[in-house]
Amino acid sequence: MAKRVLKAMMPYLTVNFGNPSSIHKEGVLANKAVEKARAKIARILFTHPDEIIFTGSGTESDNLAILGVAGLTTKKHIITTATEHKAVLSPCQQLQRRGFKVTYLTVDQAGQINLKELKDALTKDTFLVSVMMANNETGALQPIKQIAKIIRHFKKANNLHSTGGGASQPYFHTDACQAPRFLNLNVEKLGVDLMSFNGSKIYGPKGIGVLHLRRGVIMTPTIMGGGQERGLRSGTLNVSGIVGLAEALAICEKDREKESARLIKLRDKLIVELKKIADLTINGGEENRLPNNINFSVKNFEGEQLVIELDAKGFAVSSGSACSSHDPVNNNVRISFGRESSATEFRQFIKSLKDIIEKYRGLA
């Protein structure tokens, strides 16, 4: 967590620990902090404060977007991709078990969808399209603006107008959890109706997420109780987490272009060095990917094997996403890097990786 984020959070972890739903002084102070954070996030997203819903994680935001919309629609078709995070795939699979039809778009070797496949998949029974902005494992970026344009044209061509002041379906949702540090989150320019992201991917706190919900999008809650967050996400608000997330997002927005440029240079140099290693393959395209992501495989090496060996040398990498770490064997290794990553660290990483590979090949 960034020091500035922790500093912003501290008062709401200690002396100002009021419940923002209460009307006493402590509650009022907590509520003011929540609404100030909500407004700060809304400005960065170029949206309205009442379109910001706080949740407990990016996963919960994805679930609320999908299951919430599905709960109040007469339509039965959803479109997503085969490479989404499980926070999207699992609720889609649950909908399938309930009789919904789900179309899983394929991706090419660079991890990107085929826009024609999306066009062909849209029907008058489609109520939601969910495509992640940036893939958590391969770093592949999806053409969100083009996807939004295709959906708009489809609605216009089929006279799918809004009724009763609401937005018209199909809605467009994007999982943007990997995006805030590097990509513009202007929801108007992107053309999305729903957007999910969280705090832990942006040097903010864990256990806090956001769902941007465009005015007019109709949905039902998936967590019920005290009616917080416009009745869409009940539960006592995590005031310190909300404040921390807003501060972390503001820092990301301020440093986004400069930090992206720095990490792209480091990433591309590291890819060049990785390619020199025999039987190593870079997964995903070398363009249109996150500045801080590299995914690779080494022939005859399990990803988990390399993760354990690199961990022993002081490098925390992963095989797949953290959320899929309990799955059967993955052969890929994902490297993520950030604000403290340096060229010196990368040189040490390459040396360590070569030593590990040579050791095992010598034993073969």
Image (cartoon, grey):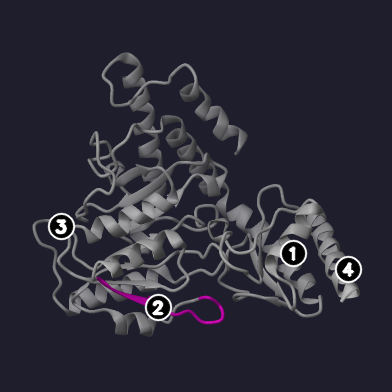
Residue at 83% over, 60% down: 347
Q: CA distance from mark 4 to mark 2?
A: 41 Å
Picture residue at 57% right of the left edge, 59% below the top = 326
Write down the residue under mark 4. Answer: 359
Q: Residues within 10 Å of mark 2 (few under 14, many from 20)?
A: some
Question: How would you rate the neighbour count of disc 3 (Cα within 10 Å): few for under 14, some for 14-19, many for 20 or more?
Answer: few
Residue 6 visible, this orientation = yes
Binning the other alpha carbons within 10 Å of mark 4 as few (below 14), some (14 to 19) or many (20 upward) gives few
Is 271 included in the stretch rendered in magenta? no
Three-letter residue code for mark 4: Lys
Which element type, helix, strand or loop, lies under badge 3?
loop
Marked residue nearer the N-terminal end (4 or 2): 2
Label 4 element class: helix
Q: Nearer the viewer, mark 3 or mark 2?
A: 2
Q: What's the distance in space between the residues labelled 3 and 1, CA to CA?
A: 51 Å
Q: Amino acid at mark 3?
A: Gly
- Residue 306's label in the rendered image is 1
The image quadrant that residue 352 belongs to is bottom right
- The mark closer to the camera, 4 or 3, is 4
Is mark 3 in CB contact (under 8 Å) with mark 1?
no
Q: Position of residue 17 (x, y in %)?
A: 42, 21
Select label 4 or label 2 by which is in front.
4
Look at the image and tell me in which quarter the N terminus lies. top right
Q: Position of residue 6 (x, y in %)?
A: 56, 31
Q: CA distance from mark 3 to mark 2?
A: 28 Å
In 3D space, how far apart are the residues under numbered discs 4 and 1 (Cα atoms)?
12 Å
Disc 1 secondary structure class: helix
Q: Quarter of the image holding residue 3?
A: top right
Kind of residue sitting beneath label 2: Leu
Q: Residue at x 36, y 33 (%)?
A: 237
Q: Which mark is residue 166?
A: 3
Q: Is residue 82 left or right of residue 301?
A: left
